[in-house]
Image (cartoon, helix red, strand yellow):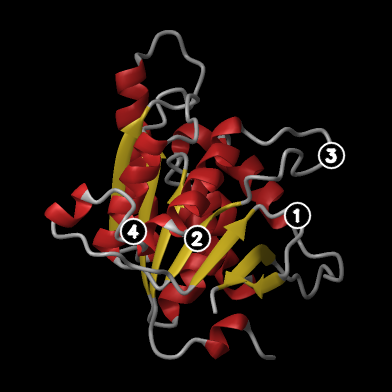
Amino acid sequence: MTTPEDKWIGLQNILVILAHPDDPDFFCGGSIARWIKQGHIVKYCLLTRGDKGFNDRTSSPETIALTRQLEQRAAAAILGVQKVTFLNYLDGYLVPGLEIRKEVVRIIRKEKPDILVTCDPTNLFPRPGAINHPDHRAAGQIVIDASFPASGNSFYFPDLLQEGLEPHSVKEVWLSVASQPNVTIDVTNYWGLKIQALHEHKSQIGNPQEFDQRMLSRKSPESTTENPRYEEKFYRIIFG
């Protein structure tokens, strides 16, 4: 079966920019594992430090942030992610604006990704009975606005040129948690590795056995018990 990656020429530099520690692994950990297995380079950039990631008044925001960042680095190591960067904005308070757009442009120009992965800023209700976290939507908007036209145009944030950061245009943007996906990736062979990485997010998953049951139940509609199939979906933008 032909997959989108079959049309990539050579190995790709993939940069995943999302809001919170654990977002990459939850949203697209199977695809990330698949891409790394194929030889592509994957790096993470998390916009927030995750300091509101669990509601425990006995913990300080600093302790929560440290816990979640350590968990994210451990999960990334399991998948083979080469680098994890945190911009350390406050969890829950992301707002698209010029300051953070410039920070993301800086990251894009520094890492020079071919493929940029973020999330769909238009997806307000990702599933019945759920509201998409405002940070998720804000992160997607920030990254999209940074990817085009700012990262590839020298007249945007010209002081970045003084840092030696020349304009860089990505080839593609992939939006996870998409309201209208146009790409489906079969990650059946990598679902177990995704779950293994998610186990490192101990502060987030609760009882591991119950968590595994939930994850294993997320089969595609045409799956059978004997032949389960797991998928991750994206909205893919290819720049001409």
Q: Position of residue 11 (x, y in %)?
A: 38, 84
The span from disc 2 to disc 1 (Cα, nearest Å) is: 25 Å
**Does label 1 or label 3 sit earlier along the sequence?**
3
**What is the C-alpha distance between the residues marked 2 and 3?**
24 Å
Is mark 2 in CB contact (under 8 Å) with mark 3?
Answer: no
Amino acid type shown at disc 1: Ser
Tell me which label, 2 or 1, sits earlier in the chain. 2
Between discs 2 and 3, the one toward the N terminus? 2
Q: Circle 1 — which element?
A: loop
The amino acid type of the residue labelled 3 equals: Pro
* 186, above or below 144, in the image: below
| In the displayed structure image, the side of residue 10 where residue 164 appears, left or right | left
Separation of residues labelled 2 and 4 (CA atoms): 11 Å
Q: Residue at x 60, y 69 (%)?
A: 237
Q: Residue at x 49, y 30 (%)?
A: 95
First in residue order: circle 2 vs circle 4: 4
Q: Is residue 148 left or right of residue 110?
A: right
Q: Circle 1 is placed at which residue position?
A: 217
Of marks 4 and 3, which one's residue comes earlier in the chain?
4
Mark 2 vs mark 4: in front: 4
Residue contact at pointers 4 and 1, CB within 8 angstroms = no
The front one of 94 and 21 is 94
Q: Which residue is mark 2?
A: 117
Please identify, in this view, whether the residue under mark 4 or under mark 3 is nearer the observer: 4
